[in-house]
Structures are given as C-alpha cells and as structure tokens.
Amino acid sequence: MELPIISVVVPVYNVEKYLEKCLNSILEQTYKNFEVILVDDGSSDCCFNICEQYAKKDTRIKAFHKKNGGLADARNYGIKRAIGNYITFIDSDDFVKKEYLEFLLSLLEKHNADISMCGNFRYWEGKKVKSVKKVEVRVFSGLEAVENLLYQKNIENSAWGKLYKRELFDNIQYPKGKLYEDLGTTYKIIFNAERVVWSSIQKYFYLQRESSIMSRKFSNQNMDRVYLSEEILQFVHNMAPSIEKSALSRYFISNIQILREIPYKDISYEDQYYEIMGNISQLRKGVLLDRNAKNINR
C-alpha cells in the first residue's frame, strides 16, 4: 500500500453544520495521495458520528475522538499521528478548492521550498465571497518570511492555507490552552525553514462566524495576544536581532488590537487597560517612525 505524501489534519469541534462541506472538499481534491486525520476534540454534537461515517467510506480518512483540550491540543494530536512527508491544516468549518493540495505541493516543489502558502477567501456566512485579481508569487528565506509575517504584509499567522515539510514540527507544538495559538507558533515554524514560497492565488475558504473562537466576548484570555507577541519579541531579540523592528511592530499592533477590544469603562479590566496603555506609550515613538510597520488605522 502506497504511503500518503500529504497529511491533512482537521481539528473538529461542534461544527456539524459545516463539517460535511469541509470533508467533501477534501475528498474532491485533484491530488489523491493524502491521508485525512480527523481529530474530534470532545464535540457535544454529531461531529464524531459524521467523522466515523466518512472514515468508513474512504480508507484515507482516520477518525479520532479525544477529550476536549482546545484547538492547539487537537492540532498537536493530529501532528503526532501524521505519517505524510508534508502536513496541511484545514479547519472543520472551512473548505478548499479542489486543486488546493495539488497547487501547494507543486508550488513547494517548483521553488524547492520547505513551506508553501496560498491566498484565502475570507467571508461571513451568507455574504458574497470577494476574490483577489492580482496574481503574485514571492520566495523568501526563512528569516525574510518571519519579518514579512511580523510586519503583517503577505504572510498570515494562520496554520491553514499552508503546506509544511513534516520535520518542521519535530520540536514545535501549538501552545495548549491559549487563544491565538497560531500567533505563538507560526513564526517558529517559518524560522526553521530555509525557503518559503507565498502565492496570492486563493485556494482556501475561511468562514468567519459569530460563534467562532475568534468572535468571543472579551475576557482575560484575550490578553494572550499581547503575551504571545511579547514572546515573539524575546525570541527575535535572541535569535534574529536583525529583524527586531518587525517584532516590535507586531507587539505594538497586538497591544492596539487588544485596547480596541477592551470593553469601554469596564472596571473589571482596569488592570489590563493600564498595562496595555503602558506598553503602547513605551513603543509608540519607535514603531511610528518605522516605515515598514503596519498602518494602525487599517
């Protein structure tokens, strides 16, 4: 039996409304040599039954059920069980174009890269999907790609929409129990890559919905965005000081984003407010003088 070249890891949690569309888009791929690792993270709906049904229909699909541990934990669980040379992630409420795997693999092989990336359609349920007409391909060194990521230019923090060489995850895990777990991980993976290729061509459909993790009301856990960005700053300071300005920019923007999310005049988050304001005051001058920094008004 031929071993799969690509492992598709799909974390699943209470998305029975969207799951079949996601799985059908994977099974319709033009590239066929892949396995699908479905990790049901303790769903309370019918998700695991759907996963089991699909596993019975196609031997490439493996369905796992585990105690709820969050998105990061589900991804780590899937990575450990992946046997492909390459790994890609697809969130279970999203779907992909039929040439998603073929496109990412050919892009990676053509440019002799360790990671390939495609563009995505971001849309709200029931609304029209907007496409990008401009077609662009860029090749980076790992360090250049980290800098591009932190300046928030072409490369996004998302785990999905990318194809990775399996060995890039050998000593890296997503931080369990954290919001914005991609923010705390993607830069490390890219840093370990020698070459990264990015394309603006959109092959991934990212559904933004009110009930998703990223749409929750503000809580102390939202501060993870700031703390993970601070970890990035420390990492870059130690490992890649030549791009430290980009890490300062990312940290500054994270503080601005959280400041905008803190409920107005809610004394429950007074400490967080003053912590954020202190960070912004300290960083403001240097970041605003950096022409590469992201426009905070966007």
Image (tube, rainbow, N blue to C red):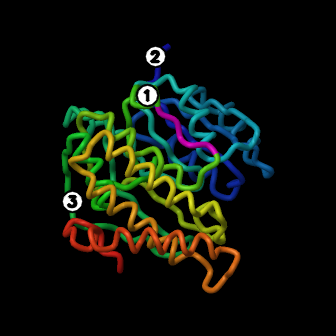
Tell me what residue is drawn at x 80 percent, y 50 percent.
Answer: 44
Which residues make up the magenta segment? Answer: 172-176
Tell me what residue is drawn at x 65 percent, y 74 percent.
Answer: 269
Q: Main secondary structure of the magenta part?
A: loop
Q: Is residue 103 visible?
A: no
Which residue, as the protein is rendered here, is positioned at the far right? 44
The x, y position of residue 211, in whole percent, is: 66, 66
Quadrant of the rendered image containing residue 76: top right
Residue 150 is left or right of residue 195, and the answer is right
| Mark 3 crowdedness (10 Å alpha carbons): few <14, some 14-19, many ≥20 | few
Q: Is residue 173 magenta?
A: yes
The x, y position of residue 147, in whole percent, is: 26, 52
Which residue, as the protein is rendered here, is positioned at the far bottom? 265
Tell me what residue is drawn at x 68 percent, y 55 percent.
Answer: 15
- Residue type for callout 1: Asn
What residue sits right under mark 2 in the picture? 2
In the image, residue 192 above or below residue 236:
above
Tell me what residue is drawn at x 33 percent, y 34 percent.
Answer: 192
On-image quarter of the C terminus: bottom left
Quadrant of the rendered image containing residue 230: bottom left
The disc label shown at residue 33, or none: 1
What residue sits right under mark 3 in the picture? 135
Are discs 2 and 1 less than 8 Å apart at CB? yes
Q: Is residue 1 magenta?
A: no
Residue 158 is left or right of residue 193, and the answer is right
